Amino acid sequence: FMGRIDKGAELLKNKVIDKIQLTGGNAPGELSEAEAALKYLQSMHKLSPKNIEVENLTSTTNEQIKFVKSNLENGDKSKKFIIISDEFHLKRVEEMVDFYNLNAEVISSNYKLNFQKSFYYRVRDSIGLIIFWFFGL
């Protein structure tokens, strides 16, 4: 989680991007993932909320990509997005971006896993990719 947020802060500070869109919902009674990320950006990176948008209703990667497509792209195919994810998750995100015909570059956070965790998450994400291919979920 923090690796993706740190990468977004780095891109904003280096003027590669001009805005960060945080996505991610929550369980009832909990702070949403997007709101937690905003608090982290403000406290750890001292970023102003003027360049940060928060969406806290989506709960899956698929919903988040659809949100970007329908709410941020708004039919303007010339808009380009950078989507940050962890390395083990990139292939599935790239497939979703292609499926929804979104003009986006998918880049890796700097988050590193040990071999055992990397293997586990890659297997899990591979299963998720197969489910996406078959059912669009």
Image: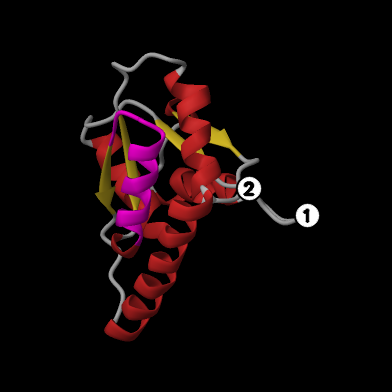
For disc 1, the marked residue is: 28
Relative to 32, does residue 127 appear above or below in the rendering?
A: below
Within the image, what quadrant is residue 48 found in? Answer: top left
Q: Which residues are magenta?
A: 89-104
Three-letter amino acid code at the position of disc 2: Gly
Give x and y (percent) for residue 137. Answer: 54, 51
Relative to 23, does residue 19 appear above or below in the rendering?
A: above
Front residue of 86 and 18: 86
Q: Quadrant where the N terminus lies?
A: bottom left
Give x and y (percent) for residue 128. Answer: 46, 62
Picture residue at 39% right of the left edge, 50% below the top? 5
Q: Is residue 131 left or right of residue 77?
A: right
Three-letter amino acid code at the position of disc 1: Pro
Give x and y (percent) for residue 25. Answer: 63, 48
- Compute the Cα span from label 2 to label 1: 9 Å
Res. 26 in view: yes
Front residue of 102 and 39: 102
Which secondary structure, mark 2?
A: loop
Res. 37 in view: no
For disc 2, the marked residue is: 25
Relative to 1, does residue 136 appear above or below in the rendering?
A: above
Picture residue at 31% right of the left edge, 75% below the top? 113
Q: Is residue 92 left or right of residue 128?
A: left
Residue lying at the far front of the rendered structure:
134
Within the image, what quadrant is residue 57 found in? Answer: top right
Give x and y (percent) for residue 34. Answer: 55, 45
Front residue of 51 and 109: 109
